[in-house]
Image (cartoon, rainbow, N blue to C red):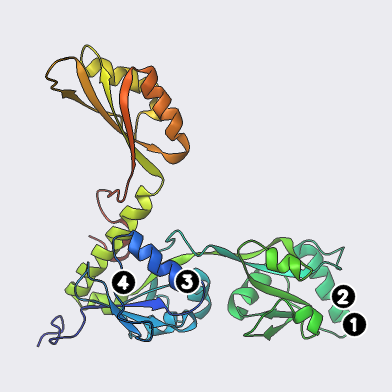
Amino acid sequence: MTETETAPGQPLLRLLLPSDGDLHQTTLDFLRDCGLPVRRPNSRRYTATVPALPGVEVLFQRTADITAKVEDGSAELGINGLDRLLEYREAERRAAVLVGNLGYGRCELVLAVPDSWLDVTSLADLADLALEFRQQGKQLRIATKYPRLLSAFLYDRGINYFTLAPASGTLEAAPIAGYADLIADLTATGATLRENRLKTLDDGTVLSSQACLLANTELLAQSPDARALTRALTEMMEAHLRAEPYYRLTANVQGPSADAVSGMILARPALAGLRGPTVARVYGIEEQGWFSVSLLVKKDRLLEAVDHLRDCGAEDVAASQLSYLFDSRSHAYQALFGA
């Protein structure tokens, strides 16, 4: 058996998905929206399949373990938060980002201090406070689940006097409980921080995170079959994400010629589609001189584009949301693996 062949019954590509936390269901929903629904016989099983891509085996893992599992070769691909990837990645060459933003799981890793610290609103204020603590023979204590990311962030900004209090549970209570002075934690809206009488520093965002697709490039380099499935998976994701902001508008417009109709549409270039309208003659039984117009517009300009078509004499205007919008190639796949 050659190194690129797979024994009967073995998967050609293994994909790790979160089994816990906010990313679990949102990841399954995202894959379904991409046309890649995951088939899992029951919630107690930690393996599943993707019927649209035979040869792909899904393995459910804790978000805290996915990066390490991709790095150690337990799987070729994984979906995880960017925060988890950057905090736990040991070998950048092996655990590379394939698609950096899957469009969900957005949150920020921020520094938050007690509301009672009225004079501390920025990193400069925090640096002064850290120095005051040191002069008093104390260390500023920060509770966090991201010691690597936080330390690098503070050192880069000249804040050197602090100690980290690693924690696995709820961090918001750390200042009240007394085992930390402030925290660095993930937040999506800031509501939980405010409810616990904490405030974020104005320039205290350590990282903006979201769900991403990561890949073990060394494993994929050994298997053309795995790379082919990876490209198919990536193409479907990219095409879905690229299509999300757009609607397709179609309408019938009467005019003397296709050039005349396209000229009316192009009078407002911002509402004339990605690369201009597609205009084709409608062969009617009774009335002649009608043309079918098709164009892509962004959601936030949908009604504006409809009104523009009406101003051009359009009738029977229909709008449909795109499922996929494929580019000339998969940019993410080509960036990682070349042509």
Q: Do callouts 1 and 3 mark residues in contact (Cβ within 8 Å)?
A: no
Between the residue at mark 3 and the residue at mark 2, the CA separation in whole angstroms equals: 40 Å
- Secondary structure found at label 2: helix
Q: Residue at x 31, y 71 (%)?
A: 38
Residue 272 is situated, as x and y percent measured from the top left of the image, at 35, 28
Does label 4 or label 3 sit earlier along the sequence?
A: 3
The kind of residue tagged 2 is Glu
Does label 3 or label 2 sit earlier along the sequence?
A: 3
Between the residue at mark 1 and the residue at mark 4, the CA separation in whole angstroms equals: 57 Å
Q: Label 1, on which residue?
A: 136
- Left or right of 250 in this view: 269: right
The kind of residue tagged 1 is Gln
Q: Label 3, on which residue?
A: 23
Near mark 3 (Cα within 10 A), the count class, few <14, some 14-19 or many ≥20, is many
In the picture, the quarter occupied by the N terminus is bottom left
Q: Do callouts 4 and 3 mark residues in contact (Cβ within 8 Å)?
A: no
- Secondary structure found at label 3: helix
The kind of residue tagged 3 is Leu
Give the camera-side residue of 245 and 92: 245
Q: Label 2, on which residue?
A: 132
Q: Nearer the viewer, mark 4 or mark 3?
A: 4
- Left or right of 153 in this view: 18: left
Q: Do callouts 2 and 1 mark residues in contact (Cβ within 8 Å)?
A: yes
Query: In terms of image quadrants, where is residue 50?
Result: bottom left
Q: Residue furthest front?
A: 286
Q: Label 4, on which residue?
A: 38
Residue 40 is situated, as x and y percent measured from the top left of the image, at 31, 78
Near mark 1 (Cα within 10 A), the count class, few <14, some 14-19 or many ≥20, is few
Give the camera-side residue of 267 and 310: 310
